[in-house]
Every structure is written in C-alpha cells, then in structure tokens.
Image (cartoon, rainbow, N blue to C red):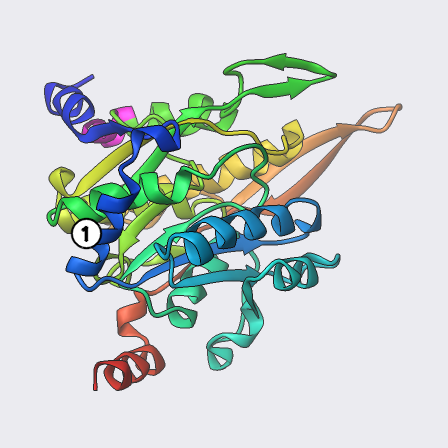
Amino acid sequence: MRPDARAWFEHRTSSATTLAELDLDALLRAKRRGGHRVSVVLPARDEEATVGRLVADLRNRWVDRLPLVDELLVVDSDSTDGTAAAARAAGADVVAAADVLPGHGTRPGKGEALWKSLAATTGDLVVFLDSDLVGDVAHYVPGLLRPLLTEPHVRYVKGCYTRPLEVDGRVQPAGGGRVTELTARPLLNALWPELAGFVQPLGGEYAGRRSALEQVPFVSSYGVEIGLLIDLLRLGGLSSLAQVDLGVRRHTSQSQEALGVMAGEVVSTVLARAESGRPGHQPLAASGLLTQFRHDGTGFVPHSRAVAVDERPPMATVPEYRSERAGLAG
C-alpha cells in the first residue's frame, strides 16, 4: 500500500460497529447546529422479503425516536413483487424510478435509482443503504453520518465491514465481497493506488454531501460505487473522503454468473475512467460485451450481455433539477 493510502487508512477510518460507540445526542446536536437535513435512500428491486423490516427499523429509530433522519425514501426499480407496498406500509416514502425526471426516460440498474434519488430528495446530507440488508444494522445510519456532521472537510463516507458468505449451508465468516477481492481491488491498486485504503470499494452503504454528489456522474449499472469513488477522489481529493467500520454486513448472496456480470460492469467503469484521464481521451478499447458459458448437459452454450458504461450526467447539469433546487433556495 502506498504511504499516502496507508496514512489515510490509519487516520481516516473510524469505528462504529455498534450503537454503543456513537454519541447519538451529540450527533443530533451537530445536525441541528449545522442546520442539516438528512435523507436516507434505499434503492430496491424485488426486495419484498427484506425492505419492510429494514424500513420499519430505520423509521422507528431515526425518525420517530431520535429525529436524525428527515426523509426516508425507497426508489423502486421496476419490481415485480410487493417491494413498493411493503416499503410504504413500513413507513417509507416510495417513488418509482421511472416517475422521477420522466422527461429523461429510465434505464435499468442500481445507479439509475441512486441518480434519480437526488432529484426526489431534499436533504443536504444523503445516506444510501442497500435494501437486502439483514440482521442488526441500526448503527449504520448514524455511523455513516458522524464524519459528515463533525468534520466539515469530509464530503463522502464509505462504510466497510466483514461480509460472511453462506454457500451450501456453510458460512465463511469473511468470505463475501468476491467481486471486490478478485476485480475491484486489483484494479484500484494498479490504477488509483491512493484508494487502496478502502476496504469495501463496492459496498452499498455510504453517505455524502449533496453539494458533492450532484457534481459527479452516476453509472447506471453495478459500476456506480466504484465510479463514484474515483470521481469524488478527482473532485475533492483524498482528504475529502472518509471510511467507517460498521462491523458485519449480511445480505443475500448472488450466483457466480451474476457476480461475473457485476465484475464486467465494474471493469468497464474503471476502464472508462482510466481512459478519460489520458491525454486526448483515447477511445475505450473494450468490446462492451461479456460472454459467459453455461453447460446444457451436452456442451457449452455461450451467452453474451452488454456491460458497457452507461451513465447519467452530474445532476447539477440537469435543468429540471436546477430549477427545483433554485425554488427550494428561494
């Protein structure tokens, strides 16, 4: 690890593995003193099994009992199950991604929901959580907010954690994050070694200042997290980034084939950003396709799908958003 990355890791990684490590009253005072408004966003697609419990806990703890959160929004990305109904019944505001900025159309992918959430919320501090979290995650929201509420120079905070992996009924305590270890981490160490101190660069739990988030593009696919990390590094430098150890993260595991698609989208995002930093902005030397193979019992059958970078522009450049923000300021 480069000396600057090691120093950053040692000094900019704080611990919030339980609520006991957090002075909640002090955080609420800091929020009020700074005049902050906090929005929590959960992108969701077919997460009926988990989103209701998660929303209910967040609302009970951080809206009703301790008013740390002002908006709790679920962005539904074309779910085919009861995700929207479960989230609404549990107390969240729910919007369909297709209904936000309808003049700009809609695209598939998690990043699309995150980008559109900026237009559907009003908080100057925005916390993003995945909707498939299970177990006790009550400390995630205040843990991610703490650096933003107490350190004015911090603009973006990534959560990190161990990720148990369950395969065939057997649990490996820290076996999750396979795309991170096999794809994202080697690429970051090679191309942006100053980011080597991030434990979970692809993790779905993070928070940022709207003033920073609205200045960077959002990749529509699973490349959104690594794209944000690289772009926010370029925007504010390493000193504007922080990391919080949230302890353990449990969620549903995906198949190897699905992880391969995710890795392809991460690679495409990284290559696009590496190329954009070169003189002359040489065209991306990638096919934009990922071919995988399945065995049908007789032989291998190839299946290809697009993993090319598809991204939305910085929200601050969208006329409808600028008009809405100007109206709120007025």
Picture coordinates of residue 230, whole percent (x, y): 27, 43
Residue 272 seen in render:
no
Residue at the far right in the pictured view = 298
- In front here: 72 or 293? 72
- Residue 309 vertical placement versus 312 (above, below): above
- In front here: 114 or 193? 114
Residue in the picture at 69% in, 63% down: 85
Residue in the picture at 15% in, 43% down: 240
Q: How many marks?
A: 1
- Residue 275 vertical placement versus 32 (above, below): above
Q: Quadrant of the N terminus?
A: top left
- Residue 70 vertical placement versus 163 (above, below): below
Residue 146 seen in render:
yes
Residue range highlighted in magenta: 189-196
Instruction: Please identify the dominant SS of the magenta region.
Output: helix
* Left or right of residue 116: residue 76: right
Residue in the picture at 29% in, 46% down: 145
Q: Secondary structure at mark 1?
A: helix
Splitting the image into 4 quarters, where does residue 189 fall?
Answer: top left
Picture coordinates of residue 103, whole percent (x, y): 48, 82
Splitting the image into 4 quarters, where does residue 44 fall?
Answer: bottom right
Which residue is denoted by mark 1 in the rendering?
Answer: 30
Disc 1 marks a residue whose amino acid type is Ala
Disc 1 crowd, CA 10 A, few/some/many (<14, 14-19, 20+): some
Picture coordinates of residue 115, whole percent (x, y): 41, 62
| Residue 256 magenta-highlighted | no
Picture coordinates of residue 242, whole percent (x, y): 22, 37
